Amino acid sequence: MKPHLGHDKLALDTLAVHAGQPPDPTSGAVMTPIVLASTFAQERPGQHKGFEYSRSGNPTRKALEACLAALEGGRHGFAFGSGSAAAATLLHTLRPGDHVLSGDDVYGGTFRLFDKVMRPMGITSTSVDMRDLDVVRKALTPATRMIWIETPTNPMLKIFDIAALADIARAHGALLVVDNTFATPVLQRPLALGAHVVAHSTTKYLNGHSDVVGGALVTSEDALAERVAFLQNALGAVPSPFDCYMVLRGLKTLGVRVRQQCASAARIAERLAEHPAVRAVHYPGLPTHAGHALAARQMQAPGAMISFVVRGGLPVASRFLERLAIFSCAESLGGVESLAEHPALMTHASVPAEAREALGIDGGLLRLSVGLEASEDLWQDIAQALDDARAHAAPGA
């Protein structure tokens, strides 16, 4: 029998390649097989080999869930058909009358779930700027059962203190949920900082190739995991075996991809901060960022997402997006290719205008997902689009 090393003894890059993915015992295949069966034969009623029906469990999905749990340092991993499906399933662990306290800067789809799906079911939510811990404490109510954050946030790239918020949540008897999509376990591991649940859109960095939609939850809370497992099966928002295989394939290069993307993003952010067409840059790696010190303490690197504000507002921002040649104007993020988008008109259009404006999500705000192209090529593309947009701006813009 081959020796086995525990996950706690292996680096993340090794776990990404091997966790939950031993060679197939039937054929010896080193890549996890795609098991497309919808049902599984039972030796006698109720006696099976661990699988009954693919909504309830599938060998390919099991491998993915084990790998995700190992990467985040959790005991239980769950895969879903989308990040929204993962979030909705977790929110179904709550009951009517419960309250969710969320960060004030979350993905528009998450806000939509809170506001349009859960609120009519009697689960209320409020949002606050969680950089101020006193504000968080004052916003808690006797009904608060969950604190939900992203860090870095989407799209303003605020940094919230996971360990401090975990302490507040535990003292109140609430769960802290951290959407770790932007950072990935390469850059931060929220469970190790005290969070109860980590959520992901596996569509993004974990898969990394813009060809799969998926989501995930990871936790070490046994009772919660039992409830999530029930809901995963009951609600049925699970990924296909093929999609699980694709995310497993993407995970194998997660570390090298994210580190390269971070290095390019850092160089681009520094140059954006010096460009005359740019009014502000939101990137935790810049010393001017309000969360710079916390990010340095909490994360391994500042990430590969950049938000910035162009002078001249929406006309300049729109022209910039139209003139990009290497970056694609598209929603989503975290793929090998670089993407640019306009949060107010695209990813965060579901957030009410007054809430967007209060956060600074206005006509001039743009968000970049830095990919794996040569960083100098990416900068030249940004520079030429900025120069063109600035040249065509209205006088005085």
Image (cartoon, rainbow, N blue to C red):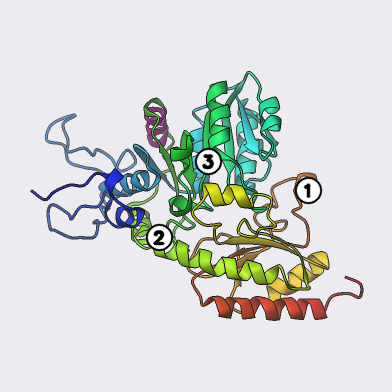
Foreground of the two, 37 or 360: 360
Residue 214 visible? The answer is: no
Residue 9: horizontal and vertical position, in percent?
A: 27, 47
Residue 178's disc number: 3
Determine the CA span between mark 1 and mark 2: 37 Å
Foreground of the two, 232 or 145: 145
Q: Look at label 3 and name its amino acid.
A: Val
Secondary structure of the residue carrying numbered label 2: helix
Q: Residues within 10 Å of mark 2 (few under 14, many from 20)?
A: many
Residue 221: horizontal and vertical position, in percent?
A: 40, 29
Read off the residue under disc 2: 255
Q: Which residues are magenta?
A: 224-233
Residue 227: in magenta span:
yes
In the visual, does 271 lie left or right of 76? right
Work out whether mark 3 precedes mark 1 in sequence or the reverse, and give the earlier one: 3
Residue 348: horizontal and vertical position, in percent?
A: 68, 52
Q: Look at label 2 and name its amino acid.
A: Gly
Residue 45: horizontal and vertical position, in percent?
A: 16, 29
Read off the residue under disc 1: 353
